[in-house]
Image (cartoon, helix red, strand yellow):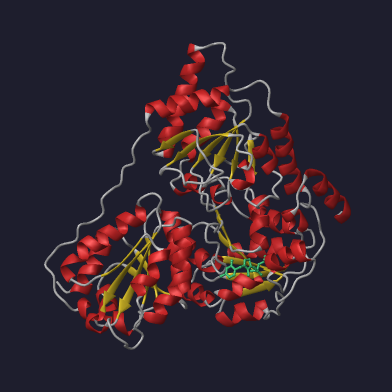
Amino acid sequence: MKASDLLVKCLESEGVEIIFGIPGEENADLMMSLSKSKIKFILTRHEQGAAFMADIYGRLTGKVGVCLATLGPGATNLVTGVANANMDRSRLLAITGQTDSHLLHKESHQNLNVVQMFEPITKWSWSIRNAKNIPEIVRRAFKIALTEKPGATHIELPQDIAKHESDIPPIGFQEIFRPTANPDQIKKAAKIILQAKKPLLFVGNGCAREDESLQIRKFVEKTKIFSINTFMGKGVIPDDYETHLQTIGIKDADHALQAVLEADVIISVGYDLVEYTPRMWNSKLDKKIIHIDFTPSEVYTFYRPDVEIDSDIGSAIESILEEIEKQQLENSSLDSFPRKEIPGIFKKVRSEVIERIDAFKDDDSYPIKPEKLIVNVRNALNHDDVVISDVGTHKLWISKIYQTFEPNTCIIPNGFASMGFALPGAIAAKLVYPKKSIVAMTGDGGFLMNVQEIETAVRLKLPIIVVVWVDNDFNLISTKQKHEFGKSVFTEFSNPNFVQIAESFGAVGFHVKSPQELSQSLQSAKTISNKPTVIAVDVDYSRNEVLLDDTFPLYVDSLNHTK
Ligand SMILES: Cc1ncc(C[n+]2csc(CCOP(=O)(O)OP(=O)(O)O)c2C)c(N)n1
């Protein structure tokens, strides 16, 4: 079989259904082979868009999202999206073309060492130099991308190798099984939890990624231990659970941080240090930490687990719960769960969280308050619809305010945190969930970084909804500059007419002028079945200070000033 045909057969045997990308001259053989396959090729308008789409496809399906580009400039355009997937632990395979393998050692057109370029932003990057190795290389790329902690891999197929022949068949998908926890560690963890005064469950990205919510919810329902999640752990525990303190992660400004600082035992589950540094909550090294994750903990001065459980998260949580129940039965003098006395700080934080969400729910002012914008979007959606956030001030507000009830229904890029993610991400999400409403929430800065993908959504007839937070500013940067230096520089810009830009692509556009109009345009967008809608909303970012300096009294003061 021709090598490019064999590569496609291997992708089919891994269950690949969609590839996102832009072809070039040097991968023409592969494109011809793909045209004979049942794999759908989705042409994007920038390779970065393709990589973000593959990233979201990987997060939502649990499979490997695949993106494709040519050599040189096509490959460099993939870089940001691939790095984003890798650092956010999303399963992704990037396939790039390359010039003839006998030209690679010297100066030649568009020749760049792409394999080396991808090394720091993938778990594995490889160039195919012998057609017979294709089945092994493809299987290896998928296995590595899928193995915890998952991430990106890269395969290069040089133009001449694509034409070679091989008679080695594909290896095909093989399921990965994760080990169960060590019983001694489970006993130790249960003992520490039973002796704790203020234990707190800290839910991270890993729990959402592998959807461990069933066991985690059972654990908190039975023990009534309070919980908190990182941005990427949103939805594992529903935000309406009375014992849930919702989302933490805005450096030292989160009011919910008060609860973590007060806790004596942190049960850290699927927590990625890349999201939120433990220095923020454990600088005094005064907490006991139970580390539960698929992989051993990172070495970090402020993260020194007393017990490490490196296994399947769900089964570890289930075993700890059984062990707690067993030890409680055996020793009636233990202060067992659920406790009669709830630590006051946890109750206080929970009521603060709710107060903040509700503070502006009836506010009619315009430009709109971030809280009101988010509440209106929340009210327009079902619990299992999907919101994808871009990166900027809006992301911080979404993390705090957007009420989430299922994992992977509020997706926030928070490892690499690249702008330009939400719109392409929404396209991939709609392909995965055609029946759900999919909303991209993006700043005006991030929107214009990948605005060209509106054409992709129009061509594919995808009714995604893009909510653009308009303030003519790279606001997160100006907010931080003002906080530190008292002024902001080099962050302001002007914007195109958002209605005209949407319509020129063949999409629907609104630029709303009140909170009510926002709700109406969201409703109207939901009735459209064959094209995207762009809704521009002017945002009042005047209260951003609470994102950066957020002690309880200050927050109450800021409410009094604004109301
Ligand atoms: C690709 C990329 N470039 C730059 C940054 C740094 N950055 C983080 S937030 C931000 C501003 C975002 O502005 P906008 O999209 O308008 O959202 P807003 O902050 O106004 O809500 C910048 C420049 C980044 N994270 N990603």
Q: Give the residue drawn at x 66%, y 56%.
A: 396
Q: Quadrant of residue 160?
A: bottom left
Measured from the top left, where is residue 344 in percent x and y? Answer: 73, 30
Q: Position of residue 428 (x, y in %)?
A: 46, 64
Horizontal and vertical percent position of residue 6: 20, 69
Q: Is residue 41 visible?
A: no
The answer to whether residue 78 shows anywhere in this view is: yes
Q: Residue at x 66, y 38 (%)?
A: 261
**Residue 163, picture quadrant:** bottom left
Is 47 left or right of 6, judged from the image as shown? Answer: right
158 to the left or right of 257: left
- Relative to 264, say whether 38 is above or below: below
Viewer-proximal residue among 534 and 144 = 144
Q: Position of residue 216 (x, y in %)?
A: 50, 36
**Tally of marks:** 0
- 404 versus 79 height, above or below: above
- The residue at the far left in this view is 167
User: Residue at point 49% right, 66% down?
Assistant: 427
Which quarter of the frame holds ligand 1? bottom right
Which quarter of the figure has residue 319?
A: top left
The N terminus - image quarter: bottom left
Q: Is residue 325 above or below residue 486?
A: above
Q: Nearer the viewer, residue 18 or 50?
A: 50
Which image quarter holds the C terminus?
bottom right
